[in-house]
Image (cartoon, rainbow, N blue to C red):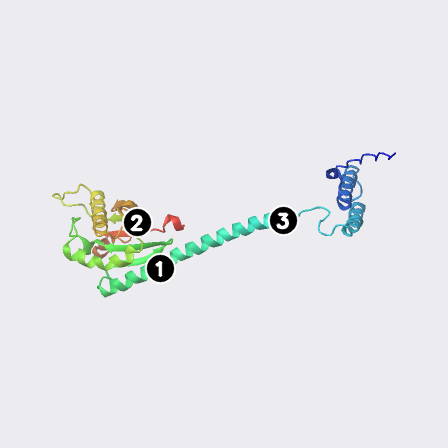
Amino acid sequence: MKKRKKPEEHVDEGWLLPYSDMLTLLLALFIVLFAMAKVDNTKFQKFKSEFGTLLSTHQSSNSIISIGKKNKAQGSTLSSASSLESSSSITSQSTNNQLMVIKQQLATNLQNSGLTNSVSVYIKSNDLHIVINSNILFDSGSATLSESTQSLLTSLFNPLKAVSTNPIIIAGYTDNQPLKLNSIYKSNWELSSARAISVMNFFVDNKVFNEDNISIQAYGENKPKDTNATAAGRSNNRRVEIIVEKNSSNS
């Protein structure tokens, strides 16, 4: 008569820990116990070092106190931040270079058109400034552009079309002389505003600027750039200024 075999005992291997993991847990337990006992720090460091040496013979890939992943994540974060900062810097530099190129093109066109004494271009606070003397734009007390003036301003078209999507500010200024009694404008404020709008319409109608990106500023006799005590100074103060700002998508 055959003997029955005893049923094999089922062992749940999921609860069994590798030898190296058990050592890690034991080490963690000892570290906690030592910390609670407030042992001498020198002895504690020596103990941790000796236990770590023993553990390293069984487990070379894990450190006693694992901080590798944290450092790696921090490194990744720092790397991403550095990349974004670098990308932003490159984009800003590219935008500044574009405005500088346009400035040079405008200067060349103005020289070829004989307007260097009446129109100046420069970069200020990363924006492109074009300052046009009102004497070549308008008659005294008027905000109407003559046909000859419009013909001269066409030399600005091609370079400025390259920044047609940028925010544009057109500002009008006058001198401090009172307007004539028969003037259609009540004040220098109104005159400076009308002149800025006239220049705006000229560039928008010729599809140089997008009207959605333009704003108007009127200063009247305020913010003079020269003295109002002389005729030459007052002439410099009568001006229209076009400011091409950096595109917000590139800031």
Furthest residue in direction front, as rendered? 1
Residue identifier under label 2: 168
Q: Nearer the viewer, residue 57 or 69?
A: 57
Q: Quarter-wise, where is residue 107 in the image? A: bottom left
Amino acid type shown at disc 2: Ile
Q: Is residue 228 visible?
A: no
Q: Is residue 139 left or right of residue 100?
A: left
Q: Nearer the viewer, residue 240 or 32?
A: 32
Mark 3 vs mark 2, foreground winner is 3
Q: How far across and how far down the image is residue 219, in percent? A: 26, 45
Residue identifier under label 3: 71
The Cα atoms of the two marked residues, 2 and 1, are separated by 16 Å
Q: How far across and how far down the image is residue 31, in percent? A: 77, 41
Report crowding for label 1: few under 14, some 14 to 19, many 20 or more residues within 10 A (C-alpha): some
Mark 3 vs mark 1, foreground winner is 3
The Cα atoms of the two marked residues, 3 and 1, are separated by 43 Å
Question: In terms of secondary structure, where does tag 2 sit?
Answer: strand
Q: Residue at x 26, y 58 (%)?
A: 158
Q: Residue at x 38, y 54 (%)?
A: 126
The Cα atoms of the two marked residues, 3 and 2, are separated by 47 Å
Count of labels in the image: 3
